[in-house]
Amino acid sequence: MKPHFLKRVRVFVSLTFFAAFSALFLDMGNSVPDLISDYVVYFQFLPSLLKFLSAGTLAAAGFIFVIFLTLLFGRVYCSFLCPLGVLQDVFIFARNKTRKITYAFQHAFSRTRYGILTGVILVFISGSITGITLTDPYSHFGRILTHIIRPAAVWMNNALVFSLAKINVYAVYPVESVKLSYLPLFFSLAVLALILWMSLSCGRLYCNTLCPVGTFLGFLSGFSVFKIRFNAGECIHCRACEKVCKAGCMDLKNNVIDFSRCVACYNCLKACPTSGVAYQWGFKKTAPVVIGDAGKRNFLLQTAAFFFASVSSLAGAQREIEIYRSSTVPVTSKTAITPPGSVSLKNFSNRCTACQLCVAACPTRVLQPANLEYGLLGVMQPRMDYKLSYCNYDCVICSAVCPTGAILPQHPNTKKLIQLGRAKFIRKNCVVYTQKTDCGACAEHCPTKAVRMVFDKEIRKHAPKIDESICVGCGACEFACPTKPYKSIYVEGNAVHVAAEKAREVKITEKVDLKEDFPF
């Protein structure tokens, strides 16, 4: 295969995946076919690994395919399939259009990269997914699109709608503005700024220093069947390859390539005027490549101890969070509410990487990034925010798009019987009792009629009554409750989701005098 062809293949495949990912997260009309999300997200390493650990089926084993490709050709995932890697290439390409970037060999920050990888693994083994949440490249990309690009796209769409309406053109539809979640917004901005700075100044330094997926795949690439190597007989030491190497892994002084840091961009193959750089059989004996540093073992041991101590301290810092900031009757939710299909709070917390794909896909916007509702270890993991919206009774979009198995796929009929929590009624906050005013908003919006209006002889008004056995915890009652500033009905989450009973038909027992009450 010709070197020029390899780079063209890389550019085509990477841009195709990048466009598919962007469409998936920026889809404002839920029009992207499920087929795209299924196959595009399938090849994301950490989400696929987590889903495999959860589901245990080959249908969730995209990470195995990535490992297979790595053992054959090296870190092709980093330049072909990783959206965050492609984003860095886009930044570098834009910079090269204004001023050409010249690269040089960089020494490996082995202590840093292997320390981060070791820390993430140890934190995960200890039972926390926080390390993956804060370092997974796919999740970083998802948060950048969801909390930075998507709100800007919605604003521009609505501005266009407003402008076209002035000339009586209504071909573009308005989109509901998304709620800004400041913690993930600031975190995403910080990550984007870091990646932008590192890519423009040092190429793919982020991938070879801070990304645990890149470090792990780099370790595997040491056993690759095919590797990029110097061809001593053809190399004229023009340094053309070194100047275009974004990974900074080509050392012409010692005539070696640190293949563990090569991201398979193939720029060197195209730049080489001779055949001095080429794919070769990976097990050919060459000069040893040094990828470690003295004292690495001691550093890793210190890193492990640090992360274990951190996990212990963070786990102890988790606490219950009040749903409402102030109320005459304090309302404290013992358990945050996780999406339908997440099975339990524990399963969700151990699988969710906070990539925000379900947040972007949710049609009612009830899924929002958590602040401290799950504790410090669950920051930015999606939660059901019934102050903002409610869960559609027959919607299963979040379960269809989740790439990690944190939310398992659900059939609409099955989802209708998943009890996320139970509605709780606070009599002292209800306007029916406090102001003797007719209401019933909660009962009108309840899809299972778990909330009904029953005549109360004491006040001679119809007041809410809850049947918890058929409540699914969708939050429609809490969202619809008009009382201010305190809700008179709220949903208490289930730590483990259970099956609700099927809604029973309610027979009307009240007699109606048609002569007296005929409406017209």
Image (tube, helix red, strand yellow):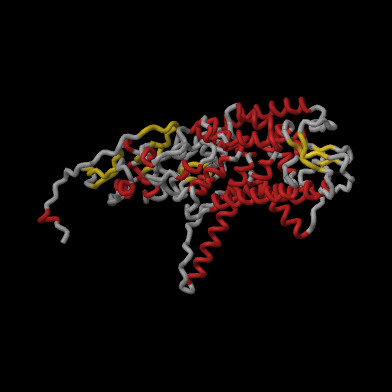
In the rendered image, is residue 445 in sight? Answer: yes
Q: Residue at the bottom extreme?
A: 167
- Residue at 46% of width from left, 32% of height from top? 344
Would you place residue 188 above or below residue 260 in this image?
Answer: below
Which residue occupies the foreground of this view, 409 or 497?
A: 409
Residue 349 visible from this viewpoint: no
| Percent x, y of residue 229 | 80, 38
Residue 162 appears left or right of 490: right
Where residue 26 appears, as percent x and y from the top left, is 54, 53
Q: Position of residue 311 (x, y in %)?
A: 62, 29
Residue at the outermost left position: 515
Q: Quadrant of the N terminus?
A: top right
> Residue 51 falls in which quadrant of the image?
top right
Which residue appears at 37% of the width and 38% of the height?
A: 414
| Frontmost residue, 401 versus 293 | 401
* In the rendered image, the vertical position of residue 404 relative to residue 145, given as above or below: above
